[in-house]
Every structure is written in C-alpha cells, then in structure tokens.
Image: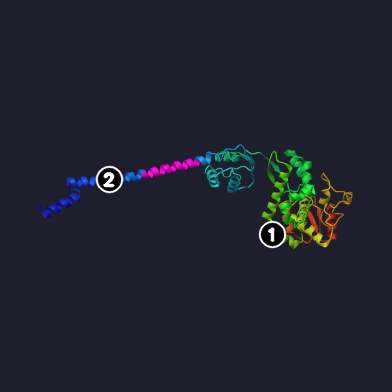
Amino acid sequence: MNLKKLWKLWKKRKNGKTKIGKKRIWKKKIEKKEKRNSKLEKILIFFSFSLILFLLFVFVILFVPKFKTNSDVEVYIQEGSSLSQVADILYEKGIIKSKEIFILYTKLIGRERNIKKGYYKLSPSYSLVHVVNKLVNGENLSIKITIPEGVSLKEIGAILEERLNISKDLFLKYCTDSNYVSSFLKEYKEFFGGKIPMSLEGYLFPSTYFLPKDIKEKEIIEILLKEFFKQILSNFPDYKEDLKKIGLSFNEWIILASIVEKEAKIDRERPLIAGVFINRLKKGYMLQSCATVEYLYDFKKNPLLYKDLEIDSPYNTYKYYGLPPTPICSPSLKSLEAILQPKGDYLFFVSNNDGTHTFSKTYEEHLKAQGYKR
C-alpha cells in the first residue's frame, strides 16, 4: 500500500468514515458523557448535602430551644418597638439564638406587624417558633393601663390601685418621701443641676403602659420615670438652650408646664397661657392661677370661692409669689413645648364659657373682659 492510500485511510478513520474510526468516536463520546454524568452527580450530591445541612440548621434554629431550663425571663416589649428592636431585646435576654433568623422568619410568615406589646415571661427553652407565636398571639402577663395627661400623683395612685394589686398609699409614699425621691432620681441628677425635687409630681409620664399583673409600686415608678426622661430627650433635644433663654431651671419648666396643662382647654392657647405666666414672673407679679389652689383639694372645686384664695399654702399663688413647690400634675408634651415657645405680651386671661380665654395686656382690659364675661 503506497503512502497516498495510507494517508486517505488515516483521514477516513479520523473522520469516522471507517468502522474502526466510528468505534473510536463513539468511545470518546461515551467517555465524555460519563465524565459529564460524574460531574453532575458530584454537583447534585454536594447541593443535596448542603440542602440537608441548611434544613437541619433551620430546624435547629426554629424548633430546638437554646437550652433546657425551668427558669423564665421577664421581657417587656414597648409600644412602637420595631421588629429589629424586639429582636435585640430577645437576643440580649438570651431567648433567641439569632436576631437575623428571628427577623427573617417573622417576615416570611408575614407577622412582623403583629407583635403585641406588653410584658412576657419567656424561656430560653422555648423554640423560636414558640416565641414568635407567643408574641403574635399576645400571650403576655400585662394589663393595659392609661395614665391621662394632667393627672396628679394621687389620681395616678388611684388608677393603679384599681387596676393592679398595689397600694395607693405606699405608691404615694415612694413618690413624696425625700429619701425615696432622691433614690429614684439618682441617675437623672444631670437634669436638675444637682438640686433634686422634693416630689415626683409631674415626672411620671402620662401615656398607655402594659404592666405585669404582679408588678410592684417601685417598679411602676421606675418605668414611668424612665419614659418621662426618654420623652424629654426625644422631643426636646435643645431644652437646655431653650431654658437658658427663658431663664428657667428644669424643675421650674415642669412646674409651669403642669400649670398650663390644668389651665388650658384648647391647644392653640397653651403658648399664650405660658406667655402670661412667664411675663408675670419676669415682672414680679404673683401667678394667681386657680389651678394651683385647686391642687390643694382632693376633689374638683368649681368654682373657687374668694375664701379659697385665702388658704395659707405655698401652692396658693394668689397669696405667695413665685412658683409652687412642685408641679401640680403630669403635663403633656404640648404644655412642655408651650413653655419653651411662649407667645404674646399678655399679663392676664379670663376663662370664657366655651373653654377659650380672653387675654389682656393691662389690668383695665382684664377688668373689662371679666365684666363682659359676667
């Protein structure tokens, strides 16, 4: 066989045109296919193993408790808490293993907006699913308590005694005894410049709370106090500079705001009433606020009589100059804001029958306003 024939035969084999060539090509194809199948099998095994590990991890996170224990942990979820804040609380208390998984799971089941506020007794022995179910179903130990704006310590004590298993008298003792007051306000000294108030009147923030059924008097006071200072910092970050401009101390701010709270019936008049009292203080006038005299009574005294204005008490601002010794109620944020942003150069106001007031700059105008009212 000459070289030319050999060359043609080799080309045919290479292109699979001969029987031997075709066998070689099929063999190579089979080998390639087997290699591809082998790789695919390895990939499938890897992903299957990874999926099993992931599912096992999810199962452990969701259904296996952090650790077995018989002890419960008290957790308080505040109103307005975000899902992230709830996760932080649960993680810090040792209830959940992972904040991220808690957030992811709660979102996946569409319950991120359904967590109920309040006090819960949870255990690290609960699974994540169990914890979420409790929070969503509101299986807490809380009682909803609303402290209205403008109520005094006595009124707060009565509300708490009616709804909870506490003593009003003991509550009032803690709020007015100088030793207890100093103890409660110890961590808030910076607000007062070292001069601690003689009472907690005005410093228990009016709001809606979810309190545990078995909570004690001191614990309630701590919660309401903490909320008060939290609201101050949140709503009035520049209060120090504002008070300097007006010439008031922190305690004087709260006292004046409490008087405005009791005098004002309409929100738009709060800054005007605040302006009247601040202007009178600057001029050295007595405040002459009926609200401070009414504070001396355990019941609503309406109307006040002239003899009531003769009561010998530092709370009688018809008889004594300056501010009363303490606030007369728990002021709202609107009244607190009114003191920081007073309006007008009025010195007098008289109440009208519809809840509004007539404001005057001079005593003569004030007398006319009183006569018109009659």
Q: Earlier in the sequence, mark 2 or mark 1?
A: 2
- 312 vs 72, left or right, is right
- Front-most of 123 and 103? 123
Residue 201's place in the image compared with 277, above or below, is above
Amino acid type, callout 2: Glu
- 332 vs 139, left or right, is right
Residue occupying image coordinates x 78% and y 42%: 170
Residue 349's place in the image compared with 50, above or below, is below
Q: Which residue is mark 1?
A: 238
Does residue 147 appear in the picture of this structure?
no
Badge 2 vs badge 1, beta-carbon distance below 8 Å:
no
* Magenta part of the chain: 42-58
Residue occupying image coordinates x 20% and y 46%: 22
Residue 52 within the magenta-colored segment of the rendering:
yes
Residue 280 within the magenta-colored segment of the rendering:
no
Density class for disc 1 (Cα within 10 Å; few <14, some 14-19, many ≥20) is few
Q: Which of the numbered marks, if any, corresponds to residue 327?
A: none
- Assign a secondary structure to mark 1: loop
Q: Which residue is mark 2?
A: 31
Density class for disc 2 (Cα within 10 Å; few <14, some 14-19, many ≥20) is few
- Front-most of 7 and 230? 7
Q: Furthest-left residue in view?
A: 1
